[in-house]
Image (spheres, grey):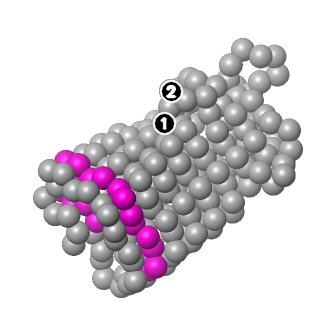
Amino acid sequence: SGGKTLFVGGHNFGNYSNIQDAINDATSGNTPIFVYDGSYCENLIVNKTINLTCESNDTIIDGNREGTAVLITANWVNLTGFTIQNCGDQECSAGILVRTDNCNISGTIVKDCYANGILLENASHTMLNSNDFINISMSGILLWNTSFDNNISDNNFMQCGFGIEAGNGSYGNTIINNSFTNSSCGVFFRLNTSDNLIKENVFVDTIYGVM
């Protein structure tokens, strides 16, 4: 349960103009925040348990090529349906950076990122389902710093350096029923990764499927 729904954009009196202002005013505990279509040039910090949803994929969060577009530091955050684009080019930047547990990101388009699409850093029990990753310079999804027991399924990776990359002690992740197209490598495991399940994925015009 959570507080009343907060609205961003649209034309109703009292709606927020910026997503971050709504997050700041939300009551932690799955408070719903609904964002109407439009382009929001923001670098968000989600430090409360909220449900962040939107009108359609025409609701755009634009990182303006500066660092990470959406940083999630609270447990049990749900983020659904956005287009997230233009993160910065630093190695640790991402369209979405998750540094916590039990989050759900689905139905989202992550594109035109100069570093990573979604970066899980010491994150566990995260669900990444039915997302599209397009034109990501480094990794569509990067599992790093002992990220474990995450579920990555039914995603599409197009024109990524690595579709999914795992390293630095990440283990026990499930990678199932994803599609990799026109990428250098579909799934890349660095040293010190173990017990990751790969099943029923499709690789098309990809130089290396799994490394």
Q: Are marks 2 and 1 in contact (CB under 8 Å)?
A: yes
Any mark on residue 50, and which?
A: none
Q: Which residues are magenta?
A: 170-187
Q: Amino acid at mark 2?
A: Asp
Is residue 106 something that shows in the picture? yes
Q: Residue at x 44, y 47 (%)?
A: 131
Left/right of residue 80 with respect to residue 182 in the rendered view: right
Q: Position of residue 3 (x, y in %)?
A: 86, 44
Disc 1, SS: strand
Please identify the quarter of the rendering in which residue 110 is found. Answer: top left
Disc 2, SS: loop
Q: Is residue 188 above or below residue 140?
A: below
Is residue 139 something that shows in the picture? no
Any mark on residue 58, and which?
A: 2
Q: Is residue 195 above or below residue 142?
A: below
Any mark on residue 83, and which?
A: 1
Q: Position of residue 146 (x, y in %)?
A: 49, 78
Q: Residue at x 48, y 36 (%)?
A: 83
Q: Residue at x 34, y 71 (%)?
A: 198
Q: CA distance from mark 2 to mark 1?
A: 7 Å
Q: Amino acid at mark 1?
A: Thr
Pick out the residue farthest to the front: 200
**Mark 2, other Cα within 10 Å: few <14 / some 14–19 / many ≥20:** some
